[in-house]
Image (cartoon, rainbow, N blue to C red):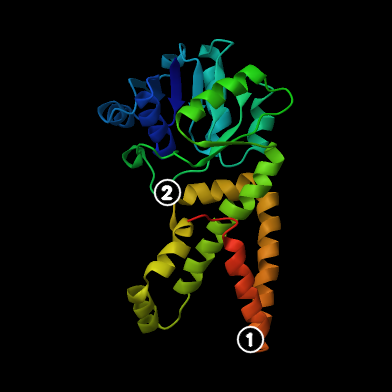
Amino acid sequence: MNIGIVGLGLIGGSLGLDLRACGYQVLGVSRREQVCQKAIDRGVVDLASMDFAILAEAEVIFICTPIAAILPTVNQLIPVLNPSTVLTDVGSVKVPVIEAITPLWSNFVGGHPMAGNSECGIEAAQTNLFVSKPYVLTPVASTPLAAVAVVENIVKSLSAKIYHCTPQAHDRAVSWISHLPVIVSGALIAACQSEANPEVLTLAQNLASSGFRDTSRVGGGNPELGLMMAHYNRDELLRSLQHYRQNLDGLIDLIEQKNWVELEQQLQSNHAARSHFVRE
């Protein structure tokens, strides 16, 4: 099977490495010739080009561009595609993407691999990035079952955990566990930077260790990703931020009132609840 990848960054590059290891022929497209060459040199793809025509023979194409570029990419792909070609994306927001693309291409399957790190670019591509990680598929009523099955089989070859849900449920869920943490983590960094005493700020920077590293990682990541999350999942992100603010205000009240008993109860509840989200 020939698989195309548009966008050879962390996700697209990692997909290429693993799909080639599974025996697929991988064809890559990037807007920069330098990236195309690096992808070939690293073994990410078999062939790469800046020209979408290279994907004319692809049976499945993963669109691994930023969210804002997904629709323009599909519009550029359509003239070169076989009608049976299956398109899928890896965007972290699904509703606006699916609403825009489904009328243009019936064989489109919304997807979102919940994998990655703070790095970006072809240099960050790595093998086994998706092993045991959630990979969400969001077919709608009009999505052909055969197209869904094709994408499922490829994702299974990555040893990822497949989940199915509606685009709406996906966007609300990721607003809690992905998009909200990015904004909150960014606010933490900004708050620390607001320290008015230069000596204290420098001391805090020198003392920052694992706790700050863990809680600031996503907020200090790729700014474009955070902006796209806020832009395309605005309503759900605002909803989760408002709930977060209410919880933060509640903690402030407990500390102001020196209500240590209730504060401890809340912290104990948080400690117990975390295991339902993170399994270490």
| Separation of residues labelled 1 and 2 (CA atoms) | 37 Å
Where residue 263 sits: x, y (%)? 64, 80
Tell me: residue 102, above or below residue 172: above
Indicate which disc, 1 or 2, sits on the residue closer to the N terminus: 2
Where residue 259 sits: x, y (%)? 67, 87
**For the residues bearing labels 1 and 2, Cβ distance under 8 angstroms:** no
- Give me the residue at 38% from left, 30% from top: 18
Q: Residue 158 or 221: which is nearer the viewer? A: 158
Left or right: 128 with respect to 132? left
Q: Residue furthest left?
A: 41
Where residue 55 sits: x, y (%)? 45, 16
Tell me: residue 194, above or below residue 119: below
Q: Amino acid at mark 2?
A: Asn
Name the secondary structure under disc 1.
helix
**Residue bearing the label numbered 1:** 260
- Give me the residue at 60% from left, 50% from top: 230
Which picture quadrant has residue 198?
Answer: bottom left
**Residue bearing the label numbered 2:** 117
Q: Amino acid at mark 1?
A: Trp
Which picture quadrant has residue 12?
Answer: top left
Residue 31 is at least partly visible in this image: no
Which picture quadrant has residue 37?
Answer: top left
Residue 226 is at least partly visible in this image: yes
For the N terminus, the quadrant is: top left
Left or right: 45 with respect to 191? left
Label disc, if present, on residue 29 of the rendered structure: none
Where residue 71 sits: x, y (%)? 58, 29
